[in-house]
Image (tube, coloured by chain):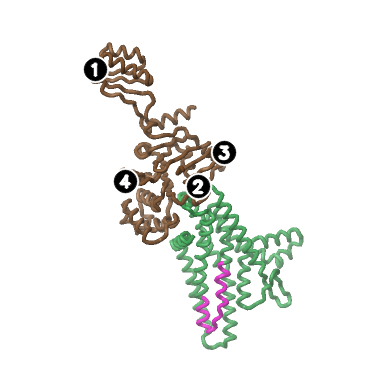
Amino acid sequence: MLTIIQNTFREALAKKIFIGYYIFYAIVILIMIFLVNMDSVEGVMSLADSKMLVHQVETGFLTISWNLIIFFSLISTASFIPSMLEKGTIDLLISKPISRPMILISKYLGAVLFVFLSMVFLMGSIWLILSLKSGYWDPTFLLSILWLTLAFAVMYSIVVIIGLTTQSTVVAILVNFFLIFVLCPLLSVREAVIFSLVTNETVQFVFDFLYYLFPKPGEFRDITTSLINSEQINMWKSSANAETGTFTISWLSPISSVLFLLVTMAYSIYYFAKKDY
Amino acid sequence: MHVIETQNLYKEYTQKFSKQKVNALNDFTFNVEQGEIFGLLGPNGAGKTTLIKILLAITFPTNGSAKLFGTDVKNHRAKTKVGYLPENHKFPSYLTGEQVLKYYGQLSGMSAGTDMNKRIDEMLGMMNLTQWRNTKIKKYSKGMMQKLGLAQSMLSDPDLIFLDEPTDGVDPIGRKEIRDILAQIKSRGKTIFLNSHLLSEVEMICDRVAILNKGDLIKEGNVDDLTKAENIFAIHTVDALTMDVKQKVLAIDGNAGIGEKEINTEAGIDKLNSIIDSLRSDGVKIQTVNQKTSTLEELFINVIKKDNTN
């Protein structure tokens, strides 16, 4: 397993997209340094002010960049499965005394671990910059490393299944783009937007069904920002308070997304184990 | 225990667009014993690669069973003592020659350390690739890639090696080197399963061959036995044959080909003996009696033609 994970890292590092990926992160980090200097946080604010500002910057950063980070991570790792399935590569891999499920799981974990370390670099750097500049050291922001990695892991299970069935990196990226930037955001505002336009119960049921069926990468962000800001998180059902204008996320979103991940990966493993190459 | 054992293997493919069913293997039963170099021959589409892929569980049979060292190939542990060089193999281009061997060595169950490094040195030396060990393989020539592939297949010192077109893209000197390496492996009691289009090469290397056509096993046996042409004998005499002697020979076998000092007969062992008796009774001195042989290529073409006509 470790051999395949290690090779997945080598594959990632060998790709030109990896350089682009880290240039993007470096730019983000530099912008953060620049912005924090602009705000002149150093030394003039009280701890309470610093805390509020840091939380605002962290929440703002996550809100803007969350989906982009996941999508960039998916682009940089989407080719792993199709390249593994190329003729002459897959034959050799399967001929080794390793079970097929282990090959696929190792490849999947390699990609997830690669993104996890990238998140440690990016989020760790941003946290360090904010903490050094503000003097307020709150590690809660570092939870974004885990939540981003988990959101990536969920979406990467789609890349795996599409990669296995179509052997196409492009299709996997396009489907993820549609899910992350179109379908999932649309489904998450279905009650506020769609249901005000469509009153038919069957259609509403279909939208509800799709909402719970598909992963919700954006709501992983809401969970993270709620944790950073010490906001309440409901157990099963998200709720909106019209009077205060606040929205309370529920744990159901990540739970249903993780279930999606498990089902998708289970089917991918089954498919890979039975397929002729 | 056989090294390779198949029972009534049957493989059916469904073509992607036409949805037509194609039989890649029909009721295929055969065994390979330890220490043999076994050659698999057949025209394109005969089912050779399908057979190798089934034996390595890369493809699954529609029916029947296959075992390696007595273990069903569906169990990945059956491949513990197996090496494989696929046709048109593709190694990760971002690795160096040494890294390729390390990667596949570890996948074969070798532990990283002194033993593996020693074995890598040995393999690279054997393939004349030592000076290229730290070069990225995207800079390797086709022949070098083939040699690296062969090194990869032998790295873990497997007891059975599957080689699919091992000399493809290799120059004549390289081919000779590969043949010598295979002979060396065989002398250590290892089993080699060879799939090659180069029939002269198969004839030189293999102990036993199987010929496949359209998924059917149409001929199998020792190379020496198969290349012996049945009932075709040549008698060479010391002195030129007289007309009287020739007439007597033709009386025994009317179709015999008679030259000045040579008689060729296809009439079977009894008539061969009658001709020899006749020559001896006339005081003709016999120099040699040989059973004629055909090359593996001649045999292959004849067998395939015959099967296609049937």
Residue position marked by numbered label 3 in the rendering: B21
Residue position marked by numbered label 2 in the rendering: B71
The amino acid at mark 1 is Ala
- Residue A129 located left or right of residue B125: right
Q: Percent position (x, y) of residue B257? A: 33, 18
Q: Earlier in the sequence, mark 3 or mark 2?
A: 3
- Chain A image colour: green
Numbered disc 2: secondary structure? strand
What's the magenta region? A126-149
The amino acid at mark 3 is Lys
Asked if the residue under mark 4 is in contact with the one under mark 1, i.e. CB atoms within 8 Å, the reply is no
Q: Which chain is brown?
A: B
Q: CA distance from mark 3 to mark 1?
A: 62 Å
Q: CA distance from mark 3 to mark 4?
A: 42 Å
Q: Are marks 4 and 2 on the same chain?
A: yes
Residue A129 lies in the magenta stretch: yes
Residue position marked by numbered label 1 in the rendering: B240
Numbered disc 4: secondary structure? helix
| Image quadrant where residue A145 sits | bottom right
